[in-house]
Amino acid sequence: MMMAKQKKTDPKKVEPLVGEQLIHKVKELETLSKEEKAKACGYYTITKNGHERVNMMQFLNALIDAEGIDLEGKSTGNGHGGRSASYRITVQANGQLLIGSAYTKQLRLNPGDEFEISLGRKHIRLNHLSREKDQAVNSAA
């Protein structure tokens, strides 16, 4: 009968920190190098020769996860990465509103397209004039 090999566990080995604990510890250790921070947060292994090896990729990935950063990226449907439309804009310092290319591409707008602006109590409506003219011409035909 064969005996299954049991994995030896190192009693000195610290479980790597994750989440808020990791962020807090890294902030505490701001004067240390990134390798020293990784090791202090438990991101290292002991090799067969007894040397410590810092697991920098695991450490950095854990930090990214702890900060809630999504590096996977979600496709915008146009085959390119980049940001997705948030459907929110902010008034610029000069008082202008800038509508990004994500919206203009989605609506298939072209340079020179004109809009009529209608102001409501709490909204702004843009009416595409070029399309209204096209629809009026097509309806009359």
Image (tube, rainbow, N blue to C red):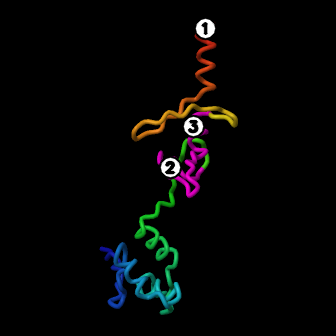
Q: Residue at x 45, y 84 (%)?
A: 45
Q: Which amino acid does label 3 sit on?
A: Gln
Up-down: is 122 above or below 8?
above
Residue stretch in magenta: 81-108
- Please state, as top left, top right, bottom left or bottom right, where the C terminus lies in the image: top right
> Residue 111: image x %, image y %?
69, 37
Magenta-highlighted stretch: main secondary structure?
loop
> Residue 46: image x %, image y %?
46, 87
Residue bearing mark 3 = 106
**Which mark is first along the chain, 3 or 1?**
3
Label 2 vs label 3: CA separation?
Answer: 16 Å
Q: Where on the picture, by quarter, is residue 23?
A: bottom left
Q: Is mark 2 on a helix, strand or loop?
A: loop
Residue bearing mark 1 = 140
Q: Where on the picture, by quarter, is residue 77?
A: top right
Q: Is mark 3 on a helix, strand or loop?
A: helix
The numbered disc on residue 101 is: none
Q: What residue type is labelled 1?
A: Ala
**Which mark is first along the chain, 3 or 2?**
2
Q: Where on the picture, by quarter, is residue 79?
A: top right
